[in-house]
Amino acid sequence: MSDLATPLDDLLAVLRASAALGPSALTPARLPAALAGRLSPADSDLAARVRALDDWHAEALADFIAEAHVLARALSRPRRPAAADAETRAG
């Protein structure tokens, strides 16, 4: 079993590399190769570690990245006023 014990900077690099991947690449079976291909030019060591992930770690990474993409989309939306905010407005 391989262990991906990376510094936070490596995890951020993986998240950045995942930004341009489509949903089909975010499956545990495809993710390591897709990420490694994007990471390889800038960080071949990190790309090799991602490519070497076992099935459990690939699935955990795929889940993490999928959740990160959901949160990123939520943060990019304009703020909607809460019900209490809407009730206090004059107009």
Image (cartoon, rainbow, N blue to C red):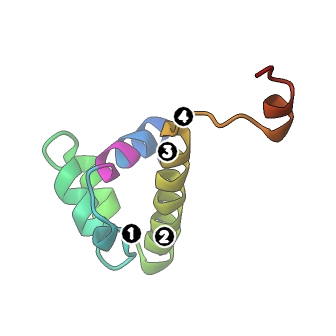
Disc 1 residue type (three-letter): Leu
According to the picture, the residue beneath numbered tag 2 turns out to be: 57
**Mark 4 or mark 1, earlier in chain:** 1
Marks 3 and 2 sit apart, C-alpha to C-alpha, by: 22 Å
Disc 2 residue type (three-letter): His
**Mark 3 or mark 1, earlier in chain:** 1
Image coordinates of residue 91 in percent, x first then y, are 76, 22
According to the picture, the residue beneath numbered tag 1 turns out to be: 53
Magenta residue check for 17: yes
In the rendered view, would you say 78 is above or below 60? above
Q: Residue at x 17, y 50 (%)?
A: 40
In the rendered view, would you say 45 is above or below 37? above
- Secondary structure beneath dot 1 equals loop
According to the picture, the residue beneath numbered tag 4 turns out to be: 78
Marks 2 and 4 sit apart, C-alpha to C-alpha, by: 34 Å
Q: Residue furthest front?
A: 91
Image coordinates of residue 21 in percent, x first then y, are 27, 58
Closest to the observer, 62 or 51 = 62
User: In this rendering, which labeled residue sits more in front, label 4 or label 3?
Assistant: 4
Q: Are marks 2 and 1 in contact (CB under 8 Å)?
A: yes
